[in-house]
Image (cartoon, rainbow, N blue to C red):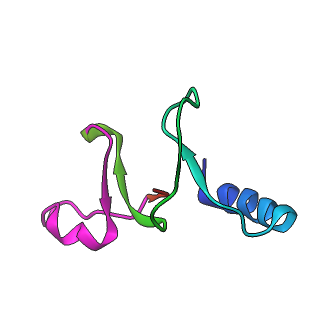
Amino acid sequence: MILSDYIKTLNDIFNDYGDVEVIYSSDDEGNDFRKVGYTPSAGNYSNFDEGQFIPLDQFNDYGDEDETLKVNSVCVN
C-alpha cells in the first residue's frame, strides 16, 4: 500500500465517522487488537535485512559514505 491510498482511506473514515480511536491487529488473523500508541514516523524499510526499519532521526547512525539512506516508508506504530 502507498501512503496516498492510506491517507485517502483515513480521510474517508474520518469524514464518515469523526475522530475515532485508532487500533491495530497484532496478526493477520485478527486474534488480538491494541490501540496505536505512536504517531507515524518516516524512515527506511529494508526487506533484505530481516525487515529492519530505521527512523529518519537515526539515519546518521547507519550507512557509510557509499550508502545513503532514503525515506521509502512510513511506520504507523
Residue 71 highlighted magenta (yes or no) = yes
Q: Quadrant of residue 3?
A: bottom right
Q: In the image, is 6 to the left or to the right of 56?
A: right
Residue at the (66%, 56%) spot, across then down: 6
User: What's the residue at 55%, 47% (across, down)?
Assistant: 24
| Residue located 12% across and 63% down the image | 64
Q: Position of residue 41 (x, y in %)?
A: 43, 66
Question: Of all residues shown, which one is farthest toward the top?
Answer: 29
Q: Is residue 70 magenta?
A: yes
Along the line of sight, the residue nearer the viewer: 33 or 43: 33
Judged left or right of residue 19, residue 3 is left
Residue 57: give x, y in percent of width and height: 29, 73
Residue at image position (24%, 68%) is 59
- Write down the quadrant of residue 55 in the picture: bottom left
At which x and y percent is residue 45? Answer: 36, 51
Q: Where 32 falls versus 65 (above or below)?
A: above
- The magenta segment is 50-72
Q: Residue 18's image quarter?
A: bottom right
